[in-house]
Amino acid sequence: MFAATGDGTLLPLYVIYKAKHLYDLWSEGGPAGARFNRSKSGWMDGSCFLDWFESIMIPYFRCFGGRKAIIVDNLSSNLSPAVIDLCKKHDIECVFLPSNSTHLTQALDVAIFRPLKQAWRQVLENWKSRTNKCSGIDKKYFPRLLKETLDML
C-alpha cells in the first residue's frame, strides 16, 4: 500500500504478503518505517486496512491540528465502523473516490508509480544478474529489494 500527501511526500509503506503467517525474515532490511502484514489472499482486507490506518495514517495525522482529509478508493474493506470511529476521534474526513473510477482518478499513477515501476524493473534486472535467478523472489529478499527501489527515487 502506497500513500502520499498532497505535496508528494511518500508515507511509510504497508506490505501485504499472501501467507497464513508472517515471519520476521520477511521484513528485515526493508524501507524505514514500513509495516508488514499478511492476508489469506495477499490483498488488502478489512483487518489489514484497519491496521494500516492505525499504524501509518493515525501517527501521520497526529502531527497536524484541525480537520484533515484522506482520499481512498471505494473498496468495501476500506470502510468499517472501527475506521469511522478513528476518523471521528482524530477529526479526519474520509473521502471515497466514485465507484469504478479509480482507473481515471488515481492521483499516484503518474507522479509515484511510473518512476517506481521503472526503478523496480532496474532493481529486478540487477538482482537477476547477481543471483542468476530468472523467476520468483523469495519473500526474505523482497524487503531489501523494495528498499533498494525506493532509494533510487
Image (cartoon, rainbow, N blue to C red):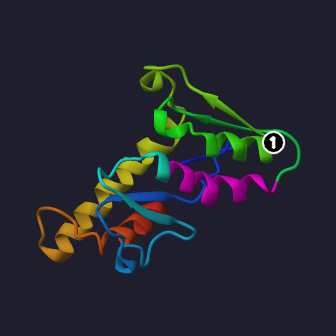
Span highlighted in magenta in the image: 48-63
**Residue 94 in which image quadrant:** top right
Q: Position of residue 104 (x, y in %)?
A: 46, 21
Q: Amino acid at mark 1?
A: Asp
The residue depicted at 35 percent of the width and 76 percent of the height is 23
Observer-nearest of 2 and 151: 2
Direction from residue 151 to residue 86 in the image, left or right: right
**Helix, strand or loop: magenta stretch:** helix
Q: Which residue is mark 1?
A: 91
Q: Is residue 117 above or below residue 35?
A: above
The residue depicted at 47 percent of the width and 61 percent of the height is 150
Q: Mark 1: few, some, or many residues within 10 Å (few <14, many ≥20)?
A: some
**Residue 84 in which image quadrant:** top right
Direction from residue 56 to residue 137 in the image, left or right: left
The residue depicted at 20 percent of the width and 76 percent of the height is 130
Q: Position of residue 45 (x, y in %)?
A: 42, 46
